[in-house]
Amino acid sequence: MTHDLFRADAYLRECEARIVRIDTAGETPGLVLDRTVFYPLGGGQAGDTGVLVLADGRELAVIDTRKAKDTDGRATDEILHVCAPGQDALLAALQPGDALTARIDWARRHRLMRFHTATHLLCHLVPQPVNGCSITPDYARMDFHMTDPLDKEALTAGLARLVGEALPLAVGRVTDAELDANPALVKSMSVQPPRGTGTVRTIRIGADDAPLDLQPCGGTHVANTAEIGAVVVTKIEKKSASTRRVVLGWAA
């Protein structure tokens, strides 16, 4: 498996690593490393981009990050760094065991962290089940399972208020048994938190004894809501009779 350093510290921008495997089976080749700061696509959040700096200083461009798959197409515990096309000669010179530096596009990642945290604030403002989301560097959207209309200006004002309150975020864990005893912690209808280790990673916003939001989440977030900055609700759509989509963007 790949040691995912971003789970413990989303602010790590680079790390030293070694190549475990070079995957050339897909349309675009990729590298599996023994450890990484690159977040793979998942939970609605886009995968990281960046560069892999080789020992001689040359850089291999990474255009996406995904969970590697087995021969049956199932996701594994390995993280695949998808390389940009046109780097065949550079890839051909690599082999398992080679050392390199994995460096993410920090400006892009930080936008993802800010948007992802903002979606958790939306979960507080719209306390309804979530049946889909997408978090990109340029916008974020959440689909809520509900029939009542939503007010764009009211939600924008609510987000501004919670950002201004400078609420701290903390990464924690609950046991599988604790999650089973409190299923309301899971806001998503479509994606269940990963199990298998006996505990599930959580994100808490606000005070320990009275959090504004607490839910299982494997994504990357900022340490304080003030860091989100100015976000606005750009659109509210009725996607179906029972789905309302809220789209977030950066304030002009």
Image (cartoon, rainbow, N blue to C red):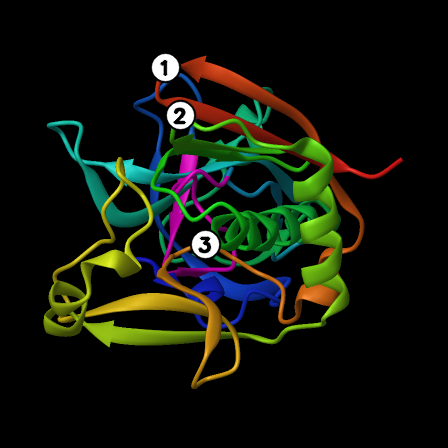
Is the Cβ of the residue at disc 2 closer than 8 Å to that at disc 1? Answer: yes
The residues bearing labels 1 and 3 have C-alpha atoms spaced at a distance of 29 Å
Q: Which residue is mark 3?
A: 219
Would you call the spot at circle 2 few (<14 residues within 10 Å), some (14-19), or many (20 or more)? Answer: few
Give the mark nearest the N terminus, 3 or 2.
Answer: 2
**Residue at 55% across, 18% down:** 237
Mark closer to the chain start, 1 or 3:
3
Q: Kindly identify which residue carries mark 1.
A: 241
Q: Are marks 3 and 2 in contact (CB under 8 Å)?
A: no
The segment highlighted magenta reads 30-45
Please give the residue where the numbered disc 2 appears in the rendered image. Answer: 147
Rendered position, 8 above or below 233: below
- The number of discs equals 3
Q: Nearer the viewer, residue 72 or 86?
A: 72
Q: Quadrant of residue 136?
A: top right
Residue 180 placement: quadrant: bottom left
Q: Position of residue 142 (x, y in %)?
A: 49, 34
